[in-house]
Image (cartoon, rainbow, N blue to C red):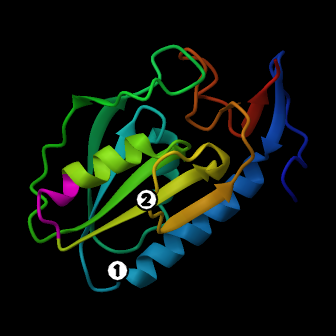
């Protein structure tokens, strides 16, 4: 099944970009790659709230190494469809990262500003390693160079919802990723 090929039902104003089966297949692959990379080690996964929760929930079920889970909340969108450019930390993690293997789990990287701020903030806590795992990469919008270790899908510059991503708080519960029609 390729991007856009599925038989899901769509809310008004949303068209399919990546189907639920394709997402689940790719999440299983990422879980396997991460498990191999960190064999015989313990990792800390840090999900960026709220968008990465669905992705993290599925991803960790496919990771076979011991792990801890923590959450970080940041804001750069408010209720808009474009990043404001200002990244605010709304909730910090509680886990000590000193000497730990850490993976930032993010729903989408577009401008790169949010991931850059998070990456620098967590590096200051002196982890043994710091990697990134993102569901969606939107390189056409990149303003800040960020290194992404694991990417599920690269997408065009369209406003997307579903599988954790929202539009003003709605659509997070869709099992697929859709494009909001203008």
Q: Is residue 52 visible?
A: yes
Near-viewer residue (29 or 89): 89
Image quarter of residue 124: bottom left
Relative to 12, is 143 above or below? below
Characterize the local packing of mark 2: few (<14), some (14-19) or many (20 or more) Cα atoms within 10 angstroms: many
Return the disc, 1 or 2, that comes first in the chain's sequence.
1
Q: Is residue 93 left or right of residue 182?
A: left
Counting from the top left corner in percent of width and height, residue 167 is at 61, 20
Circles 1 and 2 in contact, beta carbons < 8 Å:
no
Secondary structure mostly seen in magenta is: loop
Q: Is residue 123 magenta?
A: yes
Q: Residue 129, which numbered label? A: none
Q: Is residue 70 left or right of residue 152?
A: left
Q: Is residue 164 left or right of residue 86?
A: right
> Quarter holding the C terminus?
top right
**Tag 2's secondary structure?**
helix
Numbered range of the magenta stretch: 122-127
Q: Residue 60, which numbered label? A: 2
**Residue at 55% across / 16% down in the picture?**
80
Q: Is residue 105 magenta?
A: no
Relative to 119, is 111 above or below? above
Q: Which residue is mark 1?
A: 38
Query: Which one is in front in this view, the residue at disc 1 or the one at disc 2?
Result: 1
> Quarter holding the N terminus?
bottom right
Near-viewer residue (126 or 165): 126
**Residue at 28% across / 86% down in the picture?**
40
Q: Is residue 57 visible?
A: no
Q: CA distance from mark 1 to mark 2?
A: 13 Å
Counting from the top left corner in percent of width and height, residue 125 is at 11, 57
């Amino acid at each position: 099944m390729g991007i856009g090929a599925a038989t899901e039902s769509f809310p008004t104003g949303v068209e399919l970009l990546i189907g639920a089966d394709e997402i689940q297949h790719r999440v299983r692959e990422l879980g396997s790659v991460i498990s191999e990379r960190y064999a015989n080690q313990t990792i800390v996964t840090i999900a960026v709230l709220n968008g990465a929760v669905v992705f993290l929930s599925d991803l960790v079920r496919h990771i076979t190494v011991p792990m801890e889970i923590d959450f970080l909340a940041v804001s750069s969108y408010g209720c808009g469809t474009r990043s404001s450019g200002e990244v605010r930390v709304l909730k910090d993690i509680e886990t000590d990262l000193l000497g730990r293997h850490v993976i930032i789990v993010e729903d989408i990287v577009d401008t790169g500003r949010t991931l850059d701020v998070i990456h620098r903030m967590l590096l200051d806590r002196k982890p043994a390693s710091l990697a990134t795992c993102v569901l969606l990469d939107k390189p056409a919008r990149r303003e800040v160079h960020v290194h992404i270790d694991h990417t599920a899908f690269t997408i065009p510059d369209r406003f997307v919802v579903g599988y954790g991503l929202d539009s003003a708080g709605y659509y997070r519960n869709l099992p697929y990723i859709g494009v909001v029609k203008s």
